[in-house]
Amino acid sequence: MNPLNHVAIIMDGNGRWGIKKKNSRNSGHKEGLKTVEKIIKQAVKKKISYLTLYAFSTENWKRPKKEIDYLFRLLENFLTKKLNELHKNKIKLKIIGTKNFSPKLNRLLKFAEKKTSNNKTLQINLALNYGSKSELIDALRKLKNSNRKITEKNLIKYLQTSNIPDPDFLIRTGNTKRLSNFLLWQLAYSEIFFEKKLWPDFNEKDFNKIVKEYKLIKRNFGNV
Ligand code: IPE
Ligand code: IPE
Ligand code: MG
């Protein structure tokens, strides 16, 4: 059976759920946050070490300001309310992506990272203003300036995910089959599960089913 260390998720489908149920995309984002909490708890139960959640891409700035503002308010409220609980459960929070939000949110994110930095149960990598292409460009620039040799091993050191093993598998909910600029390097050998359900409808049972399926896959890594 395959060991399970790192799960990455593209949490897609909030907007469609919100429109369908309440005629507002934002209500889908609010509901999606409940799924986030469920899946975090499930990841702890399953003793997964890393959970990487795609919450906001570098491309998502194209969305209407009203939606963007709502998303970041949701995140701010969530952290304000739940940070102590996360910390009590020994969860470590790391942001991947560029923190260029409001000064208040930037401070809150840095505070949350620092407060939880020694926790060892589960590490949540929250991808916020994250884009894989800009991550790679940035890493290449740093590698070049370091005068180190351009090798895989050296490049990895400058990715935002340095010190984090590559995801064992990726789940994308929302019935869409693409990567949307998420972890292009890191997913090179990950198993990929495209899930029809919209993120707010996704639950522990769906997650467990995927874990079970993943464990039985024959992973070759080029070998036979
Ligand atoms: C994903 O859900 C969440 C974010 C990008 C923040 P969407 O908002 O993309 O939902 P759909 O794809 O429009 O339904
Ligand atoms: C990907 O979803 C980003 C997040 C889940 C944060 P999108 O809904 O933004 O992806 P595209 O634009 O449909 O590819
Ligand atoms: Mg979407």
Image (cartoon, rainbow, N blue to C red):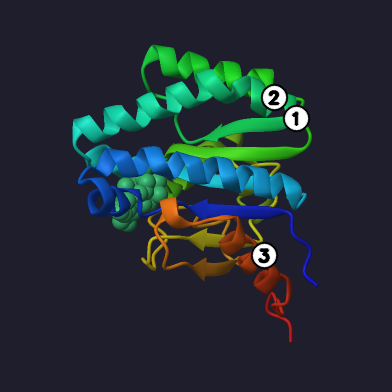
Residue of label 3: 211
* Left/right of residue 223 with respect to residue 51 in the rendered view: right
Q: Are marks 1 and 2 in contact (CB under 8 Å)?
A: yes
Side of 55 where 216 appears, left or right: right
Disc 1 element: loop
Q: CA distance from mark 1 to mark 2?
A: 5 Å
Q: Quadrant of residue 130?
A: top left
Q: Which quarter of the picture shows residue 92?
A: top right
Does residue 179 sit above or below 111 in this rendering?
A: below
Mark 1 surroundings: few (<14), some (14-19) or many (≥20) residues within 10 A:
some
Determine which residue is flagged by label 1: 90
Task: Give coordinates of residue 196: x percent, y percent.
Answer: 41, 68
User: SS for tag 2?
Assistant: helix
Q: Distance of mark 3 from mark 2, alpha carbons? A: 25 Å
The residue type indicated by label 3 comes to Val
Label 3: few (<14), some (14–19) or many (≥20) C-alpha neighbours in 10 Å? some
The residue closer to the viewer here, 115 or 31, is 31
Disc 2 designates what residue?
87
Q: Residue at x 60, y 32 (%)?
A: 94
Q: Position of residue 147 (x, y in %)?
A: 61, 38
Q: Earlier in the sequence, mark 3 or mark 2?
A: 2
Question: Rounded to the nearest whole Å, what is the CA distance between mark 3 and mark 1?
Answer: 23 Å
Quarter the N terminus occupies: bottom right
Task: Check disc 2 and give the amino acid type.
Answer: His
Picture coordinates of residue 215, whole percent (x, y): 73, 71
Q: Which mark is residue 136?
A: none
Q: Amino acid at mark 1?
A: Lys
Residue 138 x, y percent position in the rendering: 47, 39
Q: Are marks 3 and 1 in contact (CB under 8 Å)?
A: no
